[in-house]
Image (cartoon, helix red, strand yellow):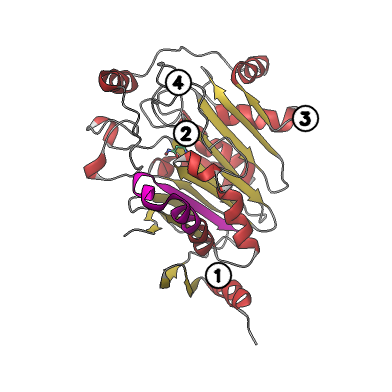
Amino acid sequence: MMNRKRFLQLGALAGAVTSMGGRGAYARQLTKVNGPVVVSTWDAGLRANKGAWEVLGKGGTALDAVEKGVMVTENEINCCVGLGANPDRDGFVTLDACIMDHRFNCGSVAFLERIKHPVSVARRVMEKTPHVMLVGSGAQQFALAEGFSLESAELSPDAKKAYQDWLKNEKYEPQINRENKENQGHGPFAPSQINGGWNHDTIGMVALDTNGNLGGSCTTSGMGFKMRGRLGDSPIIGAGLYVDGDVGACTATGQGEDVIRVAGSHSVVEMMRQGYGPEVACRKVIERIVKIKGPDVNKIQVAFLAINKHGVVGSFAIHKGFSYALKTNTAEKLVEANSWFK
Ligand code: SD4
């Protein structure tokens, strides 16, 4: 007799599956692709995916693709990620990033200042040191020794304005990350019309290359106006990103503290190892966060974005409003993720 696990595996391979779980019956669509695929969080992912595709489209590796892809976003001044993003409450932009390949090689930097491409520094940590993670002035010292330039500490015009607005109240009250017209602004605190409307600070990307290898990256300025020294999930292997070349890869966005608590991306990959399709795997971990948070779940957003070894993509968020960008040989689009609360 076919057990549940086998059913889900077959369902994922067929490209669509309907299952039971969480709060009852729910139907879902899974995207099964042939050839390379890249997905990344939020709508900045559309541009980042193009950068990744320059590598993937030519048969390059997922690892190179996920580095090149998120570098596009790190480069966008007045965007949500990189040196143009919101500072901490003391007025300094501090960046976190990590990268991982299909063989458990990984590198990470955190609390890094004045370096344009933290994801590339993370890759050097992975490739040139015996360590996984470097932080703060040590990470900066390493970056400079590796030939990265020290950039200006000046805030981008939009970040300067958002910071000055924030200083008026100095209220630490993160809002739910989403992209829609009612909640536009620069970072998680300042609803306004700046910068086309976003209130998130991260890009996570996972990809499968033509050789069937997976890779992932995640880069962020962290939560806007955070306490100095605060780290979220994004640079933490297993929280903001995890890749197991035999199973799948996952990245996270949203309230980092609540992703760290459940080792979010690693937990999603473990669910996929148990046979769940990517969306169900994401949903199972979201369900865990919803239970842990109780009524406080209304104050936070978390979203996971996963891909399995077969190129099946899935995502799930706590609240509506999370979308991810998908690129394959035949598709290039923004997809609204399913969510716990509709
Ligand atoms: C953090 N997870 O620093 C990041 C924030 C984020 O979109 O994803 N913002 O907690």
Instruction: Examine the rendered structure and indicate whether residue 297 appears above or below residue 150.
Output: below
First-in-chain label (2 vs 1)? 1
Q: Are marks 2 and 1 in contact (CB under 8 Å)?
A: no
Can you give x and y, in whole percent of width and height, for residue 2 in the image? 63, 84
Q: Which mark is residue 72?
A: 2
Q: What kind of residue is marked 4?
A: Val
Q: Residue furthest bottom?
A: 1
Q: Nearer the viewer, residue 247 or 137?
A: 137
Of circles 3 and 2, the one toward us is 3
Q: Amino acid at mark 2?
A: Val
Q: Residue at x 45, y 12 (%)?
A: 153
Alpha carbon of mark 4 to alpha carbon of mark 3: how far? Answer: 27 Å
The amino acid type, in three-letter code, at marker 3 is Pro
Q: Earlier in the sequence, mark 4 or mark 3?
A: 4
Among numbered discs 1 and 4, the one appearing first in the sequence:
1
What residue is disc 3 on?
130
State the SS at label 2.
helix
Residue to which mark 4 is pinned? 93
**Residue at the extreme right of the image, as rendered:** 130
* SS at circle 4: loop
Is the residue under label 3 in contact with that under label 1 (CB below 8 Å)?
Answer: no
Image quarter where the C terminus lies is: bottom left
What residue is rendered at 72% in x and 41% in y? 105
